[in-house]
Structure formats: structure tokens, C-alpha cells
Image (spheres, grey):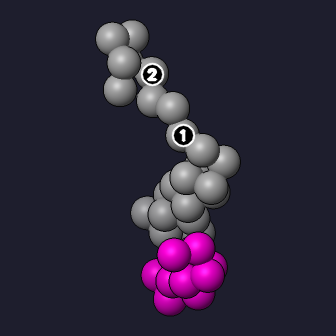
Amino acid sequence: MNATGTITMTMREVDRFKVIQAVTEARLKPGQAAERLSGWA
């Protein structure tokens, strides 16, 4: 994080964040998230 509080993320990181966010908002089950994220390692 820089001095302004901005976080820089790659598009891949943004995609992963969206999947994790969907789990925390109960829009996606953890198992489904694991399937989506498994190919990104």
C-alpha cells in the first residue's frame, strides 16, 4: 500500500478477490469457490 492508501492489484488478484467476496456474502459456497480458484494456483 502506498502513502495514499491505494492498493494496486493485478486483474487475476481482482478476480480472486471477487470469488472470496462472493463467499463472504453467501452468494457462493466455499466448495464452489475452491473449484473456481483451483486452476489459478
Residue 8 drawn at (x, y percent) = 51, 32
Q: Amino acid at mark 2?
A: Thr
**On screen, 19 above or below 17?**
below
Indicate which disc residue 22 carries: none
Residue 24 drawn at (x, y percent) = 43, 63
- Cβ atoms at labels 2 and 1 below 8 Å apart: no
Magenta region, residue range: 28-41
**On screen, 30 above or below 9?**
below
Q: Amino acid at mark 1?
A: Met
Answer left or right for 10 relative to 26.
right
Answer left or right for 24 relative to 32.
left
Residue 1 drawn at (x, y percent) = 35, 26
In percent of the image, x 51 and y 75: which residue is there? Answer: 41
Indicate which disc residue 6 carries: 2
Indicate which disc residue 9 carries: 1
Please tell me how crowded label 2 is: few (under 14), some (14-19), or many (20+) other residues with Cα within 10 Å: few
Please tell me how crowded label 1 is: few (under 14), some (14-19), or many (20+) other residues with Cα within 10 Å: few
